[in-house]
Amino acid sequence: MLKIGNTLLRAAIAIFALGTCSTALMAAPSTKDIDRLLERAVKEFNAPGIAVSVVYDDKLFYADGRGITEVGTRTRIDENTLFQIASVSKAFTTASLALLVDEGKVGWDEPVIDYLPDFRMHDPWVTREFTIRDLLTHRSGLPLGAGDLLLFPKGNTTREEIIHAMRYLKPSTSFRSAYAYDNLLYIIAGEVVAAVSGIPFERFVEERLFAPLGMTDCSATFERVKPGAVKATPHVLVDGKLTTTTSLESSTAAAAGGINCSARSMAKWAQFILDDGRTADGKQLISEAQVAELLKPVTITSSRGYMAEYAGQFLSGYALGWGVSTFYGEPMYSHSGGLWGMTTYIAVLPKERLAVFASNNQLSGAPLAIVNDVLDLFLKDDNDEPRDWIAILSEVSSDRKDDAAKAVKEAADARDADSKPSLPLASYVGTYTDPWYGEIEIGMGDDGQLWFQSGRSEKLSGPLEHFQYDTFIARWSDRRLHADAYVSFSLSPLGKVEKIRMKAVSPATDFSFDFHDLDLTRVADPQ
């Protein structure tokens, strides 16, 4: 299996390096065409607003926005409005490490424990072998989004606690054998930057990347945004109505998804990548060798069905903070980002000197649709009709919602509505603890209903509605979360409540609500 994987990886690198393509770049489109796409996307995705920037032929070709920063206000979105770019931040974390690699202070393939002695994975052998590169390439063996519940929604976990928690998170595959997206390891990568440089990650990225690139409006966390800056507010749909929300992002997660930037500044970042690590004044900030390392695929991934069908994307990989794939045969570096109520996407086509960035303040697929549609405008032949990515992604989103709703209904219809809990409700009350997550409380409200409260997040709180047998549904009080979860109690051989296992009710629940990774054991009552 390892031999086959290496063969595929070498093939992928060869394809991306050659850049063989069947599509030639045509004349640049009218900026009015991009205007129309933005206006249409705002309506189609019910987004309060969208910001877009385009770099083409080493110039800022387009930067603008449509819509408003927050429902109920008149503040317009433009190219200078700040958005939380979520996981698009990961490329800045890897670039920070590349600076330190250039200085000889860090090695991509050196063990993490050489820099963070307290770092531990579940398996001691994996701990010894786990490298800086492993922190960045989603091949740890952990399940998708493992441990994200420490941070979401709006968790109070420190970075030190995240490092400690890693030893308790159990793998779902063997080390380096499969791709599974991970956020916590990027937070730890940020701590490597801090340990080696001697300054916090936030200061490092702002001083060593944002300042020399002229991205002076950007900040490493939401809390560090400059006073008076115009910021987009996150929104979600609740019962079909746009509602403002917090992003659920914690400043702890800066290195994984905390950066705030404008579309205009992100164009400078895209140009920096196109220029192989040189700043606008020609300074080689990151060596060409290390920029190439950032963009070299490491972990083979699978292309999404609609990208394979409509863009011919048949082979994909994850590099260091970047996805590497193709778009109509063109080599492409890209990354998406999503926080609760805000989504972002960036794509860079190096052979065509073309890059597009988009962000919107709604939990939607609008940025991916806009970026793909703009790329289409540049790549299409005069005799070809471009794809309608707004329609394609809108349908994908609608189908996903419909499928999720169907699954939830089928589960509800199949339940034993006449069943009852095994014990009186008071018997389920108590403190339960998980090795990596910590404690939750099951209490009893004045109305006699069981209540769930997380010790990690005040927002993860709500009544337990009986589903069937000893399984309840946590209906979170904050209905903007869209993350209701099954809470299943199990009994000991002596008939006492012993454990809790959880699972999201809807398959559409964001993977960062990794309830299913919890193994909560009841804490013994004091004698």
Image (cartoon, helix red, strand yellow):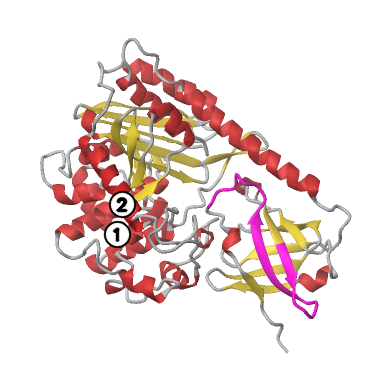
Among the 4 quarters of the image, the one containing residue 519? bottom right
Within the magenta stretch, is there residue 503? yes
Q: Using the image as rendered, state which of residue 338 and residue 386 is in the foreground.
A: 386
The answer to whether residue 429 is above or below residue 384 is below
Q: Is mark 2 on a helix, strand or loop?
A: loop
Q: Does residue 183 appear in the picture of this structure?
A: yes
Q: Using the image as rendered, state which of residue 45 and residue 361 is in the foreground.
A: 45
**Residues at discs 2 and 1 in contact (Cβ within 8 Å):** yes
According to the picture, the residue beneath numbered tag 2 turns out to be: 298
Within the magenta stretch, is there residue 378? no
According to the picture, the residue beneath numbered tag 1 turns out to be: 133
Query: Which percent across, then down, holds residue 217?
Result: 30, 43
Quadrant location, the C terminus: bottom right
- Amino acid type of disc 1? Arg
Among the 4 quarters of the image, the one containing residue 194? bottom left
- Give the residue displayed 26% in from the left and 65% down from the top: 199
Query: Which percent across, then down, holds residue 175?
Result: 40, 63
Q: Does residue 78 appear in the picture of this structure?
A: no
Among the 4 quarters of the image, the one containing residue 59? top left
Few, some or many residues within 10 Å of mark 2 (<14, 14–19, 20+): many
Q: How many labels does the image show?
A: 2
Query: Which percent across, then down, holds residue 218?
Result: 32, 45
Query: Which percent across, then down, holds residue 471?
Result: 76, 60
- Compute the Cα span from label 2 to label 1: 9 Å
Q: Give the range drawn in magenta.
A: 488-511
N-term-proximal mark, 2 vs 1: 1
